[in-house]
Image: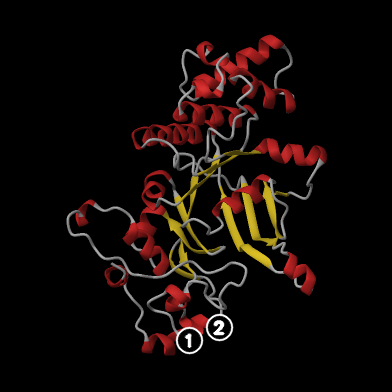
Amino acid sequence: MTVSSETPALEAHGLVKHFPVHRIRQRLRGRGEVVHAVDDVSLTLRSGEVTALVGESGSGKSTVARLLAGLYPLTDGTISIGGATVRATRGRLFREHVRRVQMVFQDPFGSLNPVHTIAYHLRRPLKVHGLAKNRAATRAATVELLEQVNLTPAEQYLAKYPHELSGGQLQRIAIARALAAEPKVLLADEPVSMLDVSIRLGLLNLLAGLVKSLGLAMLYITHDIASARYFATTTLVMYAGRVIEGGPSEELVQRPAHPYTQLLLASAPDPDRAGRDPELLDAGEPPSLVNPPEGCRFHPRCPHAMDICRTEAPGTTELRPGHWTRCWLYSADTEADTAQAPRPSSAASKEHLT
């Protein structure tokens, strides 16, 4: 997964998504509150590479995927595919966008229609996007799709219904359906979280092989930072609607900078801590996204929060080539403040959080 191209397969700049809060009391008072689900998120997906988007539930990861797939309209921001900005929300141009950017959903049982056969699910995208001209070509294409996701012999799956297959098999069908459109970008929204632990690695290896063999650009959404380290070239960490750290996966895991990233790593299962039952920092709950905190959104839970963290959102600070964070602890503009609250090293901060 080291292949890259000069022109990214997909670029997103300044994505914003606010959902209106519909409440009778607000309508009577004339107030229009919104949920700040995504605020100022930018990312780049390159062919032949996997980018992981990591964060706890409710951080906005799935909303980002749905924005990139065109399932939600943007409140603000731009999306470019192959260097061309996506502007259409319907019609022929939008259908072309949907064909190039496909999505694999978290729940394989809910993403397939239970009243239709597997053959129907695979034929449908071929028909919609005009990729199979006759019955023989369509059948050959569906067999090839099933073979691509290691469901063989393919003929024994075509006439089956979703309820006749296991969760792992259904997720492979969902991946095959996404591949039927011949996409350039694949958005995988927690594709293994609802599967048995014993079969997760096999599905991740399948996706990794498809990325390499087909030259796909993949966004892998997960709350499991350990699988991101194993699977992704680059990892982005998201908290309360904002991306707060990013870099090469191994670098980010070995030398986490942002206190939230350190907390995620401290919360992950670790064989080295087996039997010691470490007490994790009681950092409280994520903030309300209807009324998000001013400044850094992590400051109410951060053990290193300074006065500036409560009033101003931090900018981007590059720590090492490709590795950056948005945290006042690493900004040259806050030297006076960090003198009062010393900048933590990765090891010291991780120790503090465990």
For the residues labelled 1 and 2, the Cα–Cα distance comes to 7 Å
> In the rendered image of this protein, does residue 256 appear above or below residue 93?
below
Colouring rule applied to residues: secondary structure
> In the rendered image of this protein, does residue 140 appear above or below residue 35?
above
Q: Residue 87 placed where, x, y %?
A: 78, 50
Residues marked 1 and 2 touching at CB (< 8 Å): yes
For residue 311, the mark is 2
Badge 2 density bin: few <14, some 14–19, many ≥20, Cα 10 Å: some
> SS for tag 2?
loop
The image quarter containing residue 241 is bottom right
For residue 60, the mark is none
Q: Residue 257 placed where, x, y %?
A: 39, 68
Type of the residue with mark 2: Thr
Q: Please state which of residues 108 and 251 is positioned toward the viewer in this rendering.
A: 108
Position of 201 with respect to 22 (left or right) is left
Q: Residue 287 placed where, x, y %?
A: 52, 69
Which quadrant is the C terminus positioned in? bottom left
Which quadrant is the N terminus positioned in? top left
State the residue lying farthest toward the right: 91
State the residue lying farthest toward the top: 136
Q: Residue at x 45, y 29 (%)?
A: 168
Q: Please state which of residues 30 and 73 is positioned toward the viewer in this rendering.
A: 30
> SS for tag 1?
helix
Position of 19 with respect to 299 (left or right) is right
Q: Residue at x 68, y 62 (%)?
A: 18
For residue 307, the mark is 1
